[in-house]
Structure formats: structure tokens, C-alpha cells
Image (cartoon, rainbow, N blue to C red):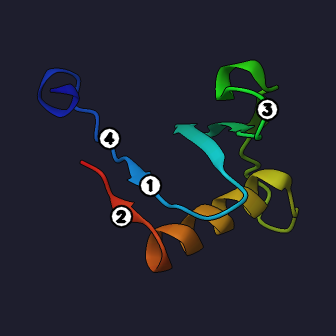
Amino acid sequence: ALNTTYGTKMQVHVYDELPLWRILVFGGTMHVSYFTGGKQGIETPVLELKKSHDKDKSTIYQAFESHIRELWNTRSKNAI
């Protein structure tokens, strides 16, 4: 397991509403891709977003971070 071997905590959450996003967060970097009706997730572009340490700056990273928190707290199921 990642947490015993590397000291890393991993969480997987799923939800079943549109839009369908694949969001992976590693430290201060977020990778965001989406699913469409005609393409597999691996065929869509991936955005790499860096977390800003400037508390007064609004970024797309912060927008997705807020979106993730909202999904996890209200509509997701913890998959593992």
C-alpha cells in the first residue's frame, strides 16, 4: 500500500453527474482532464495547474480545488 511503503495517503472519490472531470492532485500540482461522449479520457487534453501561494490571487487551481471540495462533501462516494 502507498501509505505504508511511501507514507502517502491516497483517496479516490467518484460521482455520477455532468460534467465528468478527472482530477489528480499531487502536492501543489493538479492535473485536470474531462470525459466527453465521443472520446476516452486519455484522448482529451490535460491541464496542469500549479497552486499559488499568494492568498490574494484567484486562480483556476483554486476554482477546481473548491469544486473538488464541494463534490466530495455533498455528492461523491469514497471508492476506496
Give the CA distance from mark 1 to mark 3: 21 Å
**Image location of residue 64, percent across then percent down:** 71, 57
Q: Name the residue under label 3.
A: 38
Gap between marks 2 and 3 measured at Cα: 26 Å
* Res 40 quadrant in image: top right
| Distance from the alpha carbon under mark 2 to that under mark 1 | 5 Å
* Residue contact between numbered discs 2 and 3, judged by CB atoms under 8 Å: no
Residue 20 in percent (x, y) is at 66, 51
Mark 4 is on which residue type? Answer: Met
Dot 4 or dot 3, earlier in sequence = 4
Q: What residue type is labelled 3?
A: Gly
Q: Is mark 2 on a helix, strand or loop?
A: strand
Q: How crowded is mark 2: few (under 14 residues within 10 Å), some or many (20 or more)?
A: some
Question: Mark 1 or 3, which is nearer the eye?
Answer: 3
Mark 2 vs mark 4, CA separation in Å: 14 Å
Q: How far apart are marks 4 and 3 (CA)?
A: 30 Å
Q: Residue drawn 60% across and 43% down? A: 23
Nearer mark to the viewer, of 2 and 3: 3
Q: Position of residue 44 (x, y in %)?
A: 78, 26
What kind of residue is marked 1?
Val
Packing grade of label 3 (10 A; few <14, some 14-19, many >=20) is: few
> Which of the two labelled residues, at mark 2 and mark 3, occupies the earlier sequence position?
3
**What residue did someone put label 2 on?**
77
The residue type indicated by label 2 comes to: Lys
Q: Mark 1 — residue?
A: 14
Q: In which quarter of the image is the N terminus?
A: top left
| Numbered disc in front, either 2 or 4 | 2
Marks 1 and 3, the one that precedes in the sequence: 1
